[in-house]
Amino acid sequence: MNSINPLQLSVVFFLAVVLFLSCLLIAGLSYLPFSQISQALIKRFAPGEIYRNTTPSFKIWLVLTIVIISFDAAFLRLPSPTWLDWLEFPLGLFVAIDVCFFSFKVIDKLFENYILGVALEDDTKINSELFALGQYLSKATTVLIIIFCFAQTHQINLIGLIASLGVAGATIAFASQRVIEEILWSIVLLIDRPFSVDDYIHLQDRTLGRVESIGWRSTKIRLSGRNTLAVIPNSNLVKENIENLTRAKRVISMITLTFFSQLSENEKALIQQFILDSTHDILGIDNELTQVNFKDIIDRGGEHCVRADIIFFILGATDTSMELRRGLLEIARDNIVQRLQIYGIAFNCEQTTVDVPQQMTI
């Protein structure tokens, strides 16, 4: 039976930890505009741009870090007297600490000068706690990488070290299981997104207020009327029925049909029923609020015609669902045209529509 290679097991464990932290990082920064961030990073990471934005002290720090890394690599690769072996370990430890602090400085500059700057230019509300969470997870991943590299270059058995800490780790995990549960529920809340920062929400316990931040453990809500700050654990929010008042928005869309002959009242009622039946099964269009207004007009040729203004109320339409709105409206228009053509009614359907966002009364 082949024995397990400790190095391979260490690599697998390390990659699993990095993957888990990367998932948390993606969840924490999921509110940021990644397309704009990537474009800004490509633009600002040009060699000339980096040189202009780098301070002299930072350049000196970088040069010194490269020098001591070169010295440490020389100690590891080149044969040296036995009495100098004791010097390599503290030098390697100093290199690891220096690289760690240098990486922290780079991460702070990356988040504050680049990612935060791009996010502020966008209309999307920024969640400061999630931003801090992403910054923290980036530093944690950096520390794990440095520890892994230091251990492998100095033949330190990470598996034995982790096993020796297993009992203590299990005790700490058992004591902090509530905190871990809150973090896992926070990930569910971030993925599901029942609300965003600056949304007004209403909970089952009659809590009504504006969401100020969504953290890794709790959500802060500014209560309406009292102006006090309520801190609610994310595990409680996931299990509750949440009424999002900000997203209680609808869009008014209008379509114009022109009929080339006079219509009796019975024909108008029949056409109105056709229109209502055509939109009855379309999810997202409030069939009860659909309005059909008829008006007698005279066209350019002097012929008497009837114009029907159809008003649709599309529910739950947000700024990011414009394409979905157009799809719903296209389905409704096709259904109306098919129903009218079946009964041989001559008409002209104008493709121009007017979308009017309307907030519902709270």
Image: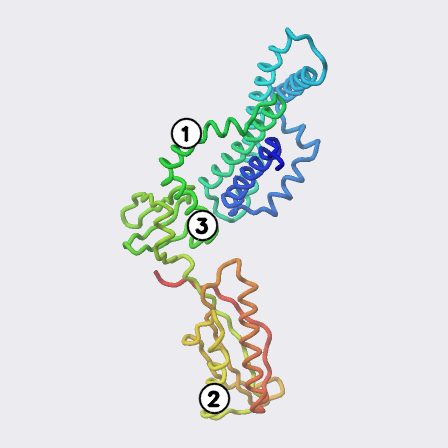
Residue 149 image-quadrant placement: top right
The span from disc 3 to disc 1 (Cα, nearest Å) is: 28 Å
Name the quarter where the C terminus is drawn. bottom left
Q: Amino acid at mark 1?
A: Ala
Q: How is the image coloured?
A: rainbow
Structural crowding at the residue carrying mark 2, measured as other residues with C-alpha within 10 Å and reported as few (<14), some (14–19) or many (≥20): some
Taking 7 as reference, is 268 above or below it?
below
Residue beneath label 2, please? 268
Give the mark nearest the N terminus, 2 or 1: 1
Taking 336 as reference, is 180 above or below it?
above
Q: For mark 1, give the secondary structure.
A: helix
Q: For mark 2, give the secondary structure.
A: helix
Residue 243 image-quadrant placement: bottom left
Residue at 51%, 35% (x, y): give it.
135
Residue beneath label 3, please? 188
Residue at 55%, 85% (x, y): give it.
339
Residue beneath label 1, please? 168
Asked whether, in this view, residue 102 is left or right of residue 315, the answer is right
Q: Amino acid at mark 2?
A: Lys
The percent position of residue 186, horizontal first and vertical second, equals: 42, 46
Name the quarter where the N terminus is drawn. top right
> Which of the numbered marks, if any, corresponds to residue 106?
none
The percent position of residue 43, horizontal first and vertical second, equals: 67, 39
Structural crowding at the residue carrying mark 1, measured as other residues with C-alpha within 10 Å and reported as few (<14), some (14–19) or many (≥20): few
The percent position of residue 78, horizontal first and vertical second, equals: 72, 15
Task: Say which of marks 2 and 3 sits in front.
Answer: 3
Task: Say which of marks 2 and 1 sits in front.
Answer: 1
Taking 57 as reference, is 265 above or below it?
below
